[in-house]
Amino acid sequence: MKTDNIKTLLEKYFEGDTSREDEKILKQYFLSNDVDESLKEYKALFQVFTQESKIQSEGISDELPFANNINKSFAIRRNASWAIAASILILMGSWFLLETQEEQEMPSKQELLLAQKYLNIGLKSFNVGFNKSNDLMKKTEMIKTHTAEALNAGIIYQAKTQEILKLNYIDKSLEKFQKISSLKESRIKVMM
Amino acid sequence: MQENQFKKVVLIHKDIMYRLALRMLRNKEDAKDIVQDSLLKLWNKRKVLENIRSHKSFALTIVRNASIDLIRKRKPETDHQDNIERMDKQNPEKQLDVSDQLQNVRIIIKQLNEQQRELIQLRDIEDLDYDEISEITGLTINTIRVNISRARKEIRSKMMDKMNFHRSLNNAI
């Protein structure tokens, strides 16, 4: 009975109509010691299939694909450099615009202090970003984070700078502020 | 995808990749080169791998396509001829022993055409289902079924020819 079933399966097998489960049954049968004499000629076929499935790759290194690693930090260092260059350009652009502005009336002390505050924030964040970027050439992920922070600080600084541009440009304003401060100091001394 | 993950989901298929390349190219050195190149390609495409459902099928597709490219570039092979000679050099009067029978089957499989070899390898040796084979080869399931049937029948036919030849010789003696 079993032999008849196997013969039926074998015919299906040669028609390409067997499932994987059917083929597993055939393999198990032909690898056993119970193969009917009339079917012995098929034993070698299934034995070869089993032996061939055990061949292993020779001399193919597990490390080979990783020998040509691209230096990841280089790409991020390059990106950080662009961010720093962009920040410098923003600052330079702001200074250039300030230089071409016509002088208007003298800003108030408060306005000058505000300008100075945002300038300091911008410079500080830029410096932080720049220093961090140098350190972070060793740690690739941190470079991205701190570069983003520096850019954000640069963006905030630029926004505030735009507001102050309506009043006066910062360098002349600071100069005047200093003159005012020194004048006030001398007045105080005189009074004393 | 990190190195550890790559080893776990791709490098683990190194052996099956090698066996497919070896079946298609019939040359160990070429098979080794193809697998190494394929692994490098897979590593360079590791970002794409993160979205792939079956890394095994993808890896085998790369190996298969690379093997086909190499076959197209090659001169007609001579090992095929060597194998035929080896079969003919066997003593025709001697009953085929088991190792001879196994070797004959190996030679017969080696003599199949490229597509038949590939399908026998993927189905009968690697036990992949027809969907996976379709994914790797780009063939429809019906085409796979028809061509596997032809390949199996050809193997059977050549095996029988050989056995009948030996039987008839033995009877004559």
Image (cartoon, coloured by chain):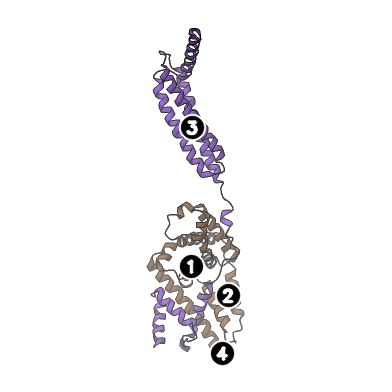
Chain colours: A purple, B brown
Depth check, mark 4 against mark 3: the one in front is 3
Give the residue displayed 48% in from the left and 40% down from the top: A145
Residue in view at x 53 percent, y 58 percent: B39
Residue A14 visible here: no
Q: Are labels 2 and 1 on one chain?
A: yes
Determine whether B33 is above or below A39 in the image.
Answer: above
Query: What residue occupies the far top of the structure in this picture?
Result: A190
Closer to viewer: mark 4 or mark 1? 1
The residues bearing labels 4 and 1 have C-alpha atoms spaced at a distance of 35 Å
Q: Earlier in the sequence, mark 4 or mark 1?
A: 1
Secondary element under disc 4, as helix, strand or loop, is: helix
Label 2 neighbourhood size at 10 Å, few (<14), some (14-19), many (20+)?
Answer: some
* Quadrant showing the N terminus of chain A: bottom left
Q: Chain of mark 2?
A: B
Q: Which mark is residue B118?
A: 1
Q: How far apart are the alpha carbons under marks 2 and 4?
A: 22 Å
Judged by depth in the image, the label closer to the viewer, 3 or 1, is: 3
Classify A190 as above or below A128: above
Q: Are marks 2 and 1 in contact (CB under 8 Å)?
A: no
Circle 4: residue type: Asn
Please name the amino acid that badge 1 sits on. Answer: Glu
Q: Nearer the viewer, mark 2 or mark 3?
A: 3
Chain letter of the residue beneath label 1 in the structure image: B
Q: Are marks 4 and 3 in contact (CB under 8 Å)?
A: no
Residue that badge 4 annotates: B170
Q: Is residue B14 visible?
A: yes
Q: Give the chain letter at badge 3.
A: A
